[in-house]
Amino acid sequence: MATQSVEGLVALVTGAASGMGAATARLFAEGGAFVALADINADGISELAWQLGARVLAFPLDVADADAITRVVGEIGAWRGRIDALVNNAGIAGFAPIDSPDYDALFARILNVNLVAHQRIIRAALPFLRRSAHPRIVNIASTEALGATALDSAYCAAKAGVTGLTRALAVELGKEGMTVNAICPGPIETGMTAAIPAEDKATYAKRRTALRRYGRPEEVAHMTVALCQPGASYVTGATIPVDGGLMARNA
């Protein structure tokens, strides 16, 4: 019978050096999973791997590099012979007016890291996911896929693409018993939001979220890990906001 335990599962988490990725990796490790940490920040994942113990290994990876994805995901798959849970968490942010001179370069970089890398990693991981009894893919999108912020069009487009990719692959891979879901975090205390003054965060949260506060990385991580459990076998193609009620609130 499928269970809620992740013990013994093999998980790959990208963007694992900090924020939601690190919190997700920590939950997997605490549950007894084997965890591959992938991030461009080699020192960050090495330190986290040391903290989390012998079942956790660090794999430096720039997800903007297609050749590196093929090589590193192959190394991760060979480590344990399979991948049970793939969490596409790596991402970057960037704001610019649509008519700014550097918009094209920003748009291309954000789409490459936040969307194109997702499908590349999934494609590289598929042979190892197909060896799993309970294969799971979770793509981290954003509530910016469901709404929009001014000057954030590149990021919004990429994250909306993630939700579309998720639905399409859920349909395509469902016949293999593979689930593919997307999580849309709202305002979360991460490196991306660290530069926002605390008083501005408090004002925004009270005005926009039902819970009147920013979320914590581990609150997103709990949903991510839940979708990767063997028992989460009939949830696929879903886009799930973890946003403190941001999308539900009108006033």
Image (cartoon, rainbow, N blue to C red):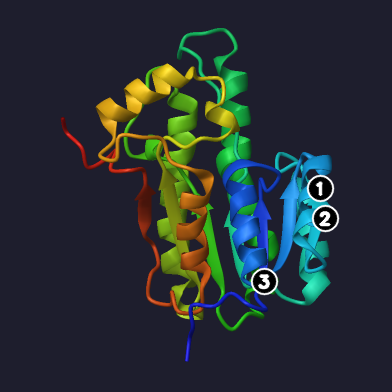
* Of marks 3 and 2, the one in the foreground: 2
Q: Of the residues shown, which amino acid type is indicated by label 1?
A: Glu
Image location (x, y in percent) of residue 50: 83, 55
Question: Which sits earlier in the primary sequence, circle 3 or circle 1?
Answer: 3
* Contact (Cβ within 8 Å) of mark 2 with mark 1: yes
Task: Give 85 or 3, whichever is nearer the viewer.
Answer: 3
141 sits left or right of 41 in the view: left
Residue at 46%, 12% (x, y): give it.
97
Q: Secondary structure at mark 1?
A: helix
Q: Earlier in the sequence, mark 3 or mark 2?
A: 3
Q: Amino acid at mark 2?
A: Trp
Q: Is residue 128 above or below residue 20?
A: below
Judging by the rendered image, the residue that carries numbered circle 1 is 47
Q: Is 100 rendered above or below residue 209?
A: above
Residue 209: image location, x then y, percent: 29, 35
Identify the residue under disc 2.
50
User: Residue 222 location, x and y as percent?
Assistant: 48, 59
Residue that mark 3 sits on: 33
